[in-house]
Structure formats: C-alpha cells, structure tokens
Amino acid sequence: LNYRNLNGTQNIGQSIQNGITNTLQNISIETGKSTYQIGRTSVAGLQPSARVIFHNHDTAIPVEGVPVTFRFIAGSGNLQNSANSNREGEVSTTITNLRTGLKNQQLLVELDMKPIQAMFEKNEELFHLFLGKKPLPQLKINIELAKVVATFTMNEAIVDGQKVCESLQRDIKAMLSQNFFTFTQDEPQSKYAVSITPSITKGETKTGNGYTVYIVYGGLNMTIVDVASGHEIFTHNISGVRGFQPGSYAHAINTACQNIWSRFQEEAIPALEQLDL
C-alpha cells in the first residue's frame, strides 16, 4: 500500500492504520453505574446500561449505531448479548436470569467487531492487518447479589488428640462468607445451616535408604440444610485425598489439609455456584 509522489514514497497502509488506532483510542464505553447491588430474587429484568462516547479533544460526543456485546466474565446467566447504541449513545442489555449463586458477578461490555469484519469478507487479511489486534473499547459492570444468612459449623479434625487443619477451617469460612453467606450464631434468624466435616487419618510409613515417608489420608464433607424445612439442599463429599512427606506425620497432615483446600476450591465452589440460594 505504497505510492510515490514528488515528496517520495508514501505508505497509505500505515496512514490508515494510524487513523484507525487514533479513532479507537478516542472511543470509550462509559457508565454512570458500574455496580448493581440486588437481591437474589430481583435479577430478572435487570438492565445494565452504558454509553458509547467519542472524545474530540475536550468534547464528549455520544455515538449512535455502534454495535456492542455483553457477556459474563465472572458468574453466568442469560442475557441479550448484543445491541446498538441509540442517538444518545446509550446501549443496554436485559438479564433474564443468573445461572450461578456467586455473590460477585461481572459483565464485559465491548465494541462488537463482527459487523465490521463482515465487510472484509472477501479480504480477511486486510481486516486482521488493520483491526485484528487493536485493543477494543470495553467496560466492566459488577453485579453483587445479596448474601443469605446462615449458621456455620466446622467440625474439628482430630489426630492423636490434637486439632489439625485449623487453617482449612479459616480458609473455607472466609471463602463462603465472601461469596455466598452472611454467617450468624443466631439460628432463628438464619435461612440455612452450613456444616463442614474434615477427616484426617494416619496411614502407613514407607522407609527407604536413610529416609522415612509418612502418609495420611483425608477428606471432607459439606452439607447445607434449609432451616425452615429441615431438608438437606446440598451435599458435597471430597475423598481419596493423600498427604505424604518425609520427616513426620505433622508434615504429611499439613500437605493433606492443603490438598483438601485445593479440592474444595476446584469441586465444591463450582457446585455451589450452580445452587439456587
């Protein structure tokens, strides 16, 4: 995309690319409300909104007809995933429901390049050359669900008369409190009763040339009971966890507790996110 004139060779492609870059840099997606705090039963019909603005020096100009997409980047739900800005530059989506119980969820609002890419159908190389790697205007919108009130019971894991895995208790309670529940000791005021039961059992030892490896076995069971009905609405069991370390059973127990925590994050939390609390 070069041409030669009296002043020498001119690169048209570079000029076009610079123009596109400058235009995209001057377009922003903005909102007056970046966080929506709602009850879990008030999600249907929620309409997060934004505005597409072109900044011309000190002047903010609403842009009409700009295609944008909406999608969850934390949590999950059903929503209108694309729209065009109106004369005021406004664009919105409607959320019909959330598919997870995660307290903190997030939407990404982003310039939709698919209609523009369709114009380059016969020459996709030009699209990727000029537009394919450009950072797109985007905006993040937070959705915070009200947490439900619950009691919390963490049954102790005992080995040889000593409490073990105490950090596991703190970590699990903190994660559940951050994302799902407001914990209380007042059972009549709680909607659910959450119970966690870890287990740690000493296993065998394996002796080699100058060393001994200590092995322990562990697991965890979690239940959630509806206080009003007494019905168990959720249970998750983690089993087959092992911890093995040289030196002592204490080291092996610590490893097993860490492995239980990892399994809890990998298995129990995604299952909880699907639960309608």
Image (spheres, rainbow, N blue to C red):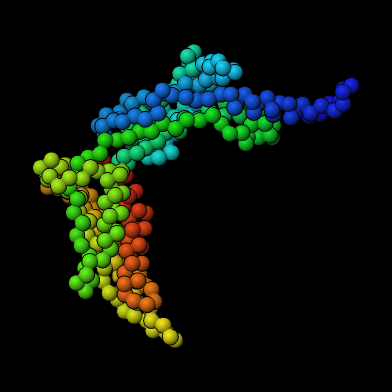
Q: What residue is at 40 percent from the left and 40 percent from the top? A: 74
From this viewpoint, is residue 274 visible?
Answer: no
Q: Position of residue 159 (x, y in %)?
A: 23, 71
Please, which residue is most extreme toward the top here? 87
Please, which residue is most extreme toward the right here? 6
The quadrant in which the C terminus is found is top left
Q: Which quadrant would residue 240 be assigned to in this image?
A: bottom left
The quadrant in which the N terminus is found is top right
Reply above or below: 155 against 41: below
From this viewpoint, is residue 61 visible?
Answer: yes
Q: Which quadrant would residue 108 be assigned to in this image?
A: top left
Please, which residue is most extreme toward the front here? 58
Q: What residue is at 31 percent from the left and 75 percent from the top? A: 249
Q: Position of residue 144 (x, y in %)?
A: 32, 35
Q: What residue is at 33 percent from the left and 26 percent from the top? A: 46
Q: Position of residue 199 (x, y in %)?
A: 24, 65
237 left or right, relative to 126: left
Count of numbered tags = 0
Q: What residue is at 21 percent from the left and 45 percent from the top? A: 183
192 left or right, relative to 8: left
Q: Position of residue 230 (x, y in %)?
A: 12, 47
